[in-house]
Image (spheres, rainbow, N blue to C red):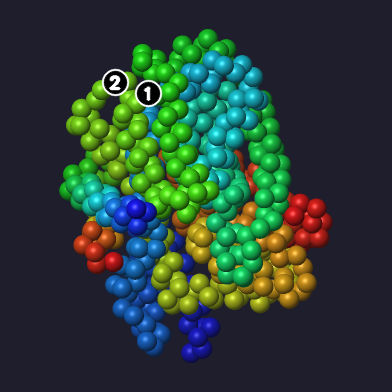
Amino acid sequence: MSTYLITTILFVIMVAVFVICSMKLKSPEISMAITGVVGALVGFFLIDGMDFPVRILVEGLFINLDLAISFICASIFVNMYSYSGAMTAVTRKLVGTFNNKWILLTFMAIFMLIPGALTGAGSISVFVMGGLVATVVRYMGVSEKKTAAFVFIFAILSAACPPINLWTMIITAQCNMPYVGFTWLLSVPIAIVGIFTIIFLGWGSKRAPKEQILAELPEAPEKMNIIRILLPLVVVIGLILLTLYAAFDVPVIGLPLTFLIGTVVVIICNPVKRTFKEYFKVINDTMEQVFPLVATVLSVGVLQESMTQIGVKGLIGVTFITMPMILIFVFVLFFAAFAQGSLSYGSAIIIGAPLVFMYNTMGFDTTIACAALSLMFPIGDCLPPSRITGRLTCETVGYKGSYMSFLKQVAIPCLVLGAIALVMFIHPAWFKFLK
Amino acid sequence: MLVFWQTVIHYLYFVIAAIIAFFFIKNFFKREKRTNLVYDIVYAYCVIPFVLRVLFVK
C-alpha cells in the first residue's frame, strides 16, 4: 500500500472512531483521546517504525499542558475575584455610571479585547472578563443566546487582536518573516467586525431601568472600594505588560504565576476576612468547574500528537495546498476554521505557512495574506472536535441551550469576519494602505 | 539576581503542578459533578502529565 493510501485509511478510521465515541460516550474529551489512541494503534500495525501508542498518549498530554495550567490559574483568579464581591461591585458601578446601552456594550467589547490581545488566547478573555461582561450584557436586555455569542465573538477577536496574534507569530516564524506591519491590518477588520457584532446582537434589546437593575443585583461588601476592586486587575495586567515591554529587566513570570500573584492580591484586598477552609473550597470548586476544559485541551494534545505521528496531519495539509488555486479560494475559509477546530494552533503550521510560501512564489503580498489567514483561524474555535473557546463561553456564561443553537447565533458575525478575511486573502493588493 | 528569580519561578511551577495534581487525585476519588465511569477514566489520564512534571520525569 502507498503511504497516501495508508494515511487516508487512518484518517477515515479516526473520523469514524470520533463520531462513534462522541455519540456513545457523550464526552468530547475522552472521544478525542480514544480517537488519538486508536489512530496510533492502527498506525502501529500499518506503518513500519511507528512507536507504540503509549508514548504518543503521554507525549500528547504534554502538548497543551502549559495552556491547561494557565486555564486553571486564570479560573482560580477569576473565581476568587468574584468570591470577594469585587465582580458585583464592578457591575453595580458600571450600570450605575452609564445609562446608555450602546456605550456600555462598547465598553464591554473593549474589556473583552484587552486580555486576549495581551496574551494571544481568546479563552483567557473569557476566563478573566467573560463572567462580568455576560452579567452586564444580560442587564442590557440581551438574550442568553446573544450574550453567549457576544462573549464568544469578542473572545475570538481578542485572540486575533494585536499586539499578540499567535497564528501570525507562528506563520511568520516559520516563513522567516518579520512580525511587523500587522497592527492596522488586524485592527481595522477587528474594529469593523466588532462594531457589526455590537449592533447585530444589541439591536432590539431593551435595557431595564437603572434602579430596577441595581435592585436586582446583589449588594457589594461594605468596605469594597475602588482600590480593592482595581488593584488585582491592575497587578495582573501590569505584570503581563511588564513581560511584554520590559522583557530584559524582569524574570519570565508566565501567565499561570501572574494569575496566582493576582489571586494573592485578591485575598489581601478582600474586605471580608475568610478562613483557609473557605478559600480551599473555592479552589476545589474551581477545579471541578474547569476540569472539562482542562481535559479537552489535554485530549486535543493526544489527538494532535497521534495525527502528527501517523501522517494524517501532513495528509490534510498537503491535500489542501496541492489543490488548484480557485479551489483553495473557495475552501480556505472552511478549511482554516475546521483545521483550527481539530488542530488548534497547529492549523497555522499545516496550512498557514505553506500558503504564505505559495503566495511568495506567486508575487502576492505575504504580510496581508498572513493577516487574512490569522483572521480566519479563530472562527474555528467554536467548531468540533475541540471547540475550546465555544464550550468555555457556554460554561462561563451559563448558557443552557443546545450547542447547535449557540453556533447558529455566532454564525453571522463569524461569516462577516470570514468574508473580510477572504477578500483580504483573494485581493491582498487592495489592503496595502493598511500596512 | 534575574537568574536567581528565574530559578525560583522555575521551581514554583513544579509546586503549582503538584497542587493541581493533588486536587485532580482528590476529585478522582471524591467529586460532586460528573461522577460516571467515563470521567473516572478522563481524570485518570489527565493527572498523568502533572504527576510526571512533579516527579521531574518530563
**Callout 1 secondary element:** loop
Name the one closer to the observer, A434 or A380: A434
- At horizontal 24% and vertical 64% (from top left) the residue drawn is B56
Q: Is residue A156 above or below residue A276?
A: below
Which amino acid, mark 2? Val
**Callout 2 secondary element:** loop
Contact flag, marks 1 and 2 (Cβ < 8 Å) = yes
- The answer to whether any part of residue A31 appears in the image is no
| Whole-percent x, y for residue A302 in the image | 38, 65
**Chain letter for the residue marked with disc 2 in the picture:** A
- At horizontal 43% and vertical 36% (from top left) the residue drawn is A235
**Would residue A26 be found to the left or right of residue A243 on screen?**
left
| Whole-percent x, y for residue A212 in the image | 51, 11
How many numbered circles are shown? 2
| Neighbours of disc 1 within 10 Å: few (<14), some (14-19), many (20+) | many
State the separation of the CA atoms marked 1 and 2: 9 Å
**Chain letter for the residue marked with disc 1 in the picture:** A
Residue that sits furthest to the front in the current view: B1
Q: Is residue A385 above or below residue A2?
A: above
The residue beneath circle 1 is A85
* Numbered mark located on residue A272 in the image: 2
- At horizontal 62% and vertical 60% (from top left) the residue drawn is A179
| Whole-percent x, y for residue A412 in the image | 66, 44
**Would residue B30 be found to the left or right of residue A327 on screen?**
left
| Neighbours of disc 2 within 10 Å: few (<14), some (14-19), many (20+) | some
| Whole-percent x, y for residue A140 in the image | 58, 23
State which quarter of the image contains the C terminus of chain A.
Answer: bottom right
Which amino acid, mark 1? Gly
